[in-house]
Image (tube, helix red, strand yellow):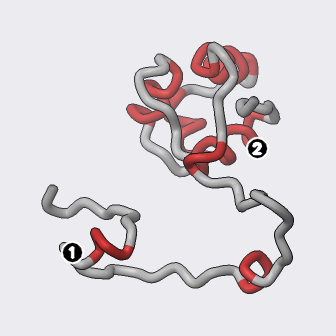
Amino acid sequence: MDGAYLKVCAECAKYGKVVKRVPQNPRISQAPRSGNQRPQDEEDYELVENYGRIIKEIREKMQLTQEELGRRIGIKPSLLAKIEQEKIIPDFQTLRKLELSLKVRLRK
């Protein structure tokens, strides 16, 4: 898709152009790891059941509209609506922002 930004592996990266490289956090990359332990990323989490309903109920209890919560965490209201309807699963970064803003744990 023209104008899309993607996070891809090195093999697939050769088909596009690098727009911005994100430097690794030296504290994380140098930290010793034991066994199969690795940093939390998109592949490493499972959402609780009815995560969309939970998000919507807490948002409404906080008297926030989708627009207000979306602005607070930096996403479009339409994306928040799809997350609340469970039509899409939020990426890890968006999930963490929702958890912190709503003060709820959405991962199992």
Asked whether 34 or 77 is in front, the reply is 34
Q: Say the numbered circle drawn on residue 16.
A: 1
The mark tally for this picture is 2
Q: Mark 1 packing: few (<14 Cα in 10 Å), some, or many (20+)?
A: few
User: Residue at point 63% right, 21% down?
Assistant: 51
- Location of residue 98 (image quadrant): top right
Which residue appears at 65% of the width and 23% of the height?
55
In the displayed structure, 51 sits above or below 105; it is: above
Say whether disc 1 or disc 2 marks the residue closer to the N-terminus: 1
- The answer to whether one can see residue 63 in this image is no
SS at mark 1 in the image: loop
Judge whether 37 appears above or below 53 on screen: below
Q: Does 80 appear above or below 94?
A: above
Q: Residue at x 65, y 32 (%)?
A: 46
Image position of 67 (left or right of 19): right
Depth check, mark 1 against mark 2: the one in front is: 1
Seen in the picture, residue 45 relative to 31 is either above or below; the reply is above
Mark 2, other Cα within 10 Å: few <14 / some 14–19 / many ≥20: few
Give the residue type that dot 2 points to: Leu
Query: Which residue sits furthest left?
Result: 2
Relative placement, left or right, of 6 versus 44 is left
Tag 1–tag 2 contact (CB < 8 Å): no
Label disc, if present, on residue 100 of the rendered structure: 2
Q: 91 and 108: which one is in front? A: 108
Residue 10, image x, y percentages: 37, 75
The C terminus - image quarter? top right
Report, in whole angstroms, how far the alpha carbon at label 1 lies from the one at label 2. Answer: 34 Å
- Please state the horizontal and vertical placement of residue 1, each as a whole percent of the image: 15, 55
Image-based side of 79 in relation to 35, left or right: left
In the image, 73 versus 65, the foreground residue is 73
Q: Which mark is residue 64?
A: none
Q: Secondary structure at mark 2?
A: helix
